Image: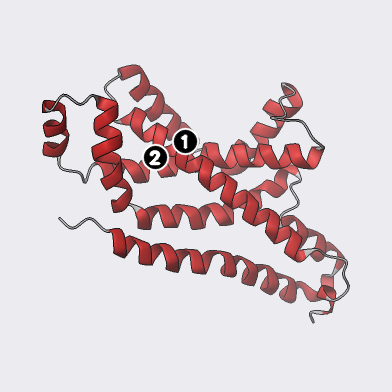
């Protein structure tokens, strides 16, 4: 049943390595972009609040496939933006990361905003009474506590991001789901085995992540 794995025709480990890289790069970018969006949404400048709110509501409710394909068609093929050049595989990978960051950052923002709402208002008011500005209050008082409060929700976002990397196959990125499609086309008599192998691979990626971050969430939880 699993003879197709011994043929050497399919680089399964290489495909999942691309999935891992997509996840790691997109997670880092999403955390940065989501934090910036959260700062905009709770900031004192109306224009920035309006931008953050509009961006989150529009992008979060747009299908991820459209976001990723839009990055490839709009930025690369139309505007010829490559973010460093390279061959088509490298450019496609970077466009996929950009699309995943643009989309996942909205969920990071909302998770962080919920964490910000758990911080007592009195702490921010006391910090402002001491002469701290908004940026100082946000980075020194609010965000450290907010991050500790939302480790578990952020873990769920990371797990969802890992599974969402399969959308990158829409623009030809050679990750696990694209290889699965190729194996299905060539190994029609081993469909169950193919699905089982790919599902097991994603379980290996997501299950330890959820367990680890669940443990971290309990360790760093804010006692109120």
Residue 176 lies, in percent from the top left, at: 70, 59
- Which of discs 2 and 1 lies nearer the camera? The answer is 1
Measured in 3D between alpha carbons, the distance from the residue under mark 2 to the one under mark 1, in whole angstroms, is 8 Å
Q: Residue at x 43, y 68 (%)?
A: 211
Residue 31 lies, in percent from the top left, at: 46, 43
Task: Please say if the residues under marks 2 and 1 sit with CB atoms less than 8 Å apart.
Answer: yes
Residue sticking out furthest to the bottom: 1
Report the residue marked by disc 1.
Answer: 33
Locate residue 35: give its quadrant. top left
Image quarter (top left, top right, bottom left or bottom right) of the C terminus: bottom left
Q: Secondary structure at mark 1?
A: helix
Q: Is residue 43 above or below residue 113?
A: above
Number of on-image labels: 2
Q: Residue at x 79, y 79 (%)?
A: 2
Q: Is residue 33 above or below residue 163?
A: above
Residue 17 lies, in percent from the top left, at: 69, 58
Q: Secondary structure at mark 2?
A: helix
Specify few, some or many for label 1: CA neighbours under 10 Å numbering under 14, 14-19, or 20 or more: many
Report the residue marked by disc 2.
Answer: 109
């Amino acid at each position: 049943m699993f003879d197709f794995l011994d043929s050497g025709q399919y680089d399964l480990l290489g495909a999942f390595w691309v999935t891992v890289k997509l996840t790691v790069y997109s997670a880092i970018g999403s955390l940065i972009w989501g934090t910036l969006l959260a700062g905009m949404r709770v900031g004192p400048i109306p224009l920035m609040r309006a931008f953050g709110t509009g961006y989150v509501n529009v992008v979060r409710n747009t299908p991820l496939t459209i976001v990723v394909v839009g990055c490839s068609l709009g930025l690369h093929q139309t505007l010829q933006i490559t973010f460093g050049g390279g061959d088509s595989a490298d450019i496609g990978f970077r466009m996929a990361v950009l699309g995943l960051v643009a989309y996942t950052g909205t969920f990071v923002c909302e998770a962080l905003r919920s964490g910000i709402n758990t911080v007592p208002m009195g702490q921010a008011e006391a910090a402002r009474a001491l002469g701290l500005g908004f940026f100082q209050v946000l980075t020194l008082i609010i965000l450290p506590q907010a991050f500790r409060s939302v480790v578990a929700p952020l873990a769920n976002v990371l797990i969802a991001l890992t599974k969402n990397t399969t959308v990158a196959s829409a623009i030809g990125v050679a990750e696990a789901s694209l290889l699965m499609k190729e194996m299905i086309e060539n190994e029609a008599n081993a469909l169950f085995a193919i699905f089982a192998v790919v599902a097991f691979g994603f379980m290996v990626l997501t299950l330890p992540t959820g367990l680890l971050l669940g443990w971290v969430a309990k360790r760093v939880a804010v006692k109120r």
